[in-house]
Image: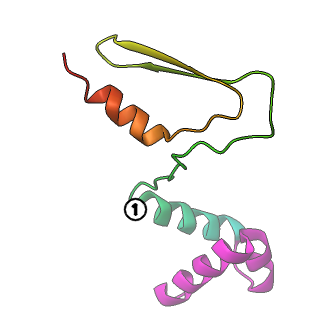
């Protein structure tokens, strides 16, 4: 099968699943899966963006505790009352930029 068709089949399998596409287009399931894995191996690493702001939960009796430990062993613990919010990114930046 021409490479353009394999590329299209892989794209469809990502959207609809390998099993469904291998049945709809008479393509060998194993061959399609190997093509997808080979394509994945050539891709750059994927990153997950984490939300960096605290999202308060419904009021609780216990507040939040944030423990930070740096590679050099420096530690910081912050205890916040229930319902308090803070920006995690700012907190980590301030901790990492501290004066020695």
Side of 46 relative to 22 (left or right) = left
49, 26: nearer the viewer? 49
Up the image or down, 60 lies above or below 24; here it is above
Q: Position of residue 56 (x, y in %)?
A: 69, 41
Of helix, strand and loop, which mostly describes the magenta segment?
Answer: helix
Q: Confirm whether the magenta stretch covers residue 14.
A: yes
Q: Please give the name of the residue rendered at 56% of the width and 66% of the height, measured from the top-left corner.
A: 36
Can you tell which quarter of the image residue 62 is in?
A: top right
Quarter placement of the C terminus: top left
Q: Position of residue 93 (x, y in %)?
A: 34, 36
Which residue is label 1 attached to?
Answer: 42
Q: Badge 1 local density, few (<14 within 10 Å), some, or many (20+)?
A: few
Side of 2 relative to 45 (left or right) = right
Up the image or down, 5 lies above or below 28; here it is below
Quarter placement of the N terminus: bottom right
Range drawn in magenta: 1-28
Side of 48 relative to 61 (left or right) = left
């Amino acid at each position: 099968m021409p490479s353009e068709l394999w590329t299209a089949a892989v794209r469809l399998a990502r959207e609809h699943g390998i099993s469904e596409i291998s049945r709809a287009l008479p393509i060998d399931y194993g061959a399609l899966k190997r093509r997808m894995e080979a394509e994945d191996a050539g891709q750059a690493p994927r990153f997950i963006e984490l939300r960096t702001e605290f999202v308060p939960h419904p009021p609780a009796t216990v507040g939040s505790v944030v423990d930070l430990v740096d590679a050099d062993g420096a530690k910081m613990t912050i205890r916040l009352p229930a319902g308090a919010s803070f920006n995690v990114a700012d907190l980590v930046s301030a901790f990492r930029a501290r004066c020695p």
